[in-house]
Every structure is written in structure tokens, then in C-alpha cells.
Image: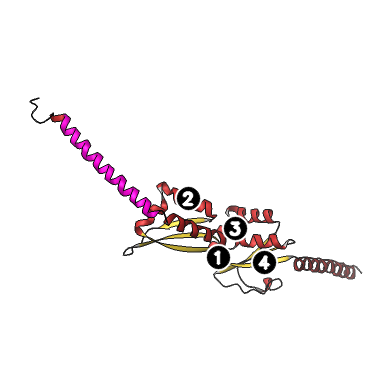
Amino acid sequence: SRGLGDVYKRQNENKKILKNIETKKSKIKSQSVEEVLVPKELLGIIIGKAGANITFIKQEYNVNIHIVESTSEDTSDYTDTHIPEDKALIRIFGSNKSWVQEAKSYICISRNTYPIEANKIDYFKGYKNSIISDMKEKSGCVKIFVHDPEKGSDQGVIEAIGNEESLESLRLLMETHMEYYETYRNKENEARELSRQESKYNNYGDVFYENGPRGDGG
């Protein structure tokens, strides 16, 4: 009968679907897999505008990436990792183990802070933020913010977002920059003194030429 034929047809379709699922599961299991938990607040930065960062990582390292924001029955088939409420799980998999690991190191970003004395903030910012911008580029950090001291505090904060390597590079760049602070301060003091003297003699000259030398009857 037609009803029985439909049943057999459905059974065959289900078998094909199950076979396809098993094939995909087997393929996933055969690949190299890395997982990383990241703060949800940084997920947007990792993904990038319209997914630009994730797309770049997939193409650069020839990997697939799956992002899961909560633990559920749907995720239990391919990961045993518990996902805390404030975290998201990023699962990276591909056929090349080293590429998967490189993709993980690229994607595994965090937030770090570096205390800085209030009188040194401008030194680290540089003219029109040129110093901190240069540090961001050289270190590879995703973002760097400079926070002025809060009321009643004599310390500000440099806040950086990046992977472990870029955050360590930033720390070293800051240490190196700090070594030249005394030289910078001496040059600043010298410049202020020269400016004071220039202003003094300019004022003296203006008076001299306006009134003429003492004793000059004009």
C-alpha cells in the first residue's frame, strides 16, 4: 500500500541522515581540536565587525570555529567542557594540529591592567597619544586604554586587551619606555627653563626698545 511505501521511504531517508551524522561525527573526532573559554564581554572583539576577525582566522589557519555561549544538551555530543555564565566556549578544529594551536593562541585574548603613577601618564600617552599608539602596534594588542586616576588616587591605569604574547610584549615595551623617563623629565625641565629665560629677555627687550636706553631723552 501507499502508506507502507511511505514508511519504507522515511526509514531509508532516516538511515541516510543517521549515516551522514555518523560520518560527520567521525570526521570531527579525527581532527585536531582545541577549546578555550573567553569572557563574554570580549566575544564581540574576538568575532570582529560582521565576523571579520573569525573569518580571517578561519582562512589564515584553515580551521573551523564553533562558538557556544551556554552549556546545553545540544553541546554535550561534542564537548564535556562546562561553560560558566560569564564565559563563552570557542571550539577550534582542523586537520593540522599546529595550525589549530596557532589559531587558539590568536583567539585566546584577555584583559590586563598596568598601574601607572599620575605624573607619568602624559609620558606614556605621548603627543596626541603617539607613544601609546606605537606600543599598541608593536605589541600586537587589540586595544589599549589609558585611564586617568580616580578621585583621591595618585595612580592611573593602562588597560590592554590581547593574547598572552601581545600582553607580555606590551609589558616589556612599557618597562623599556620607563627607563628613559628621567632623561625625558630632565629635558622637559631644561625646556621649561629655556622658555622662562627666553620670555624674560623678550620682555626686557620690549621694554628696552619701547623706552630707549636709560638716560636717552627720546
Real-space Cα distance between discs 4 and 1? 18 Å
Q: Which residue is mark 4?
A: 34
Q: Which residue is mark 1?
A: 40
| 215 left or right, relative to 96 | left
Real-space Cα distance between discs 3 and 4? 17 Å
Residue at the top extreme, as displayed: 218
Q: Which residue is mark 2?
A: 133
Q: Are marks 3 and 4 in contact (CB under 8 Å)?
A: no
| 29 left or right, relative to 149 | right
Residue at the right extreme, as displayed: 1
Mark closest to the chain's N terminus, 1 or 3: 1
Q: Which residue is mark 3?
A: 47
**Total numbered labels placed on residues in the image:** 4
Residue 193 magenta: yes
Real-space Cα distance between discs 2 and 3? 22 Å
Mark closest to the chain's N terminus, 3 or 4: 4
Residue at image coords 17%, 29%: 209
Question: Is label 3 in a helix, a strand or a loop?
Answer: helix
Residue 105 screen position, x and y as percent: 62, 62
Real-space Cα distance between discs 1 and 3? 11 Å
| Closer to us: 217 or 140 | 217
Q: Are marks 1 and 3 in contact (CB under 8 Å)?
A: no
Mark closest to the chain's N terminus, 1 or 2: 1
Q: Which residues are magenta?
A: 180-209
Residue 81 screen position, x and y as percent: 64, 73
Residue at image coords 43%, 49%: 129
Q: Amino acid at mark 3?
A: Ile
Q: Magenta-highlighted stretch: main secondary structure? A: helix
Instruction: Check disc 1: other Cα within 10 Å, few if <14, some if 14-19, many if 20+.
Output: some
| 183 left or right, relative to 22 | left
Q: Amino acid at mark 4?
A: Glu
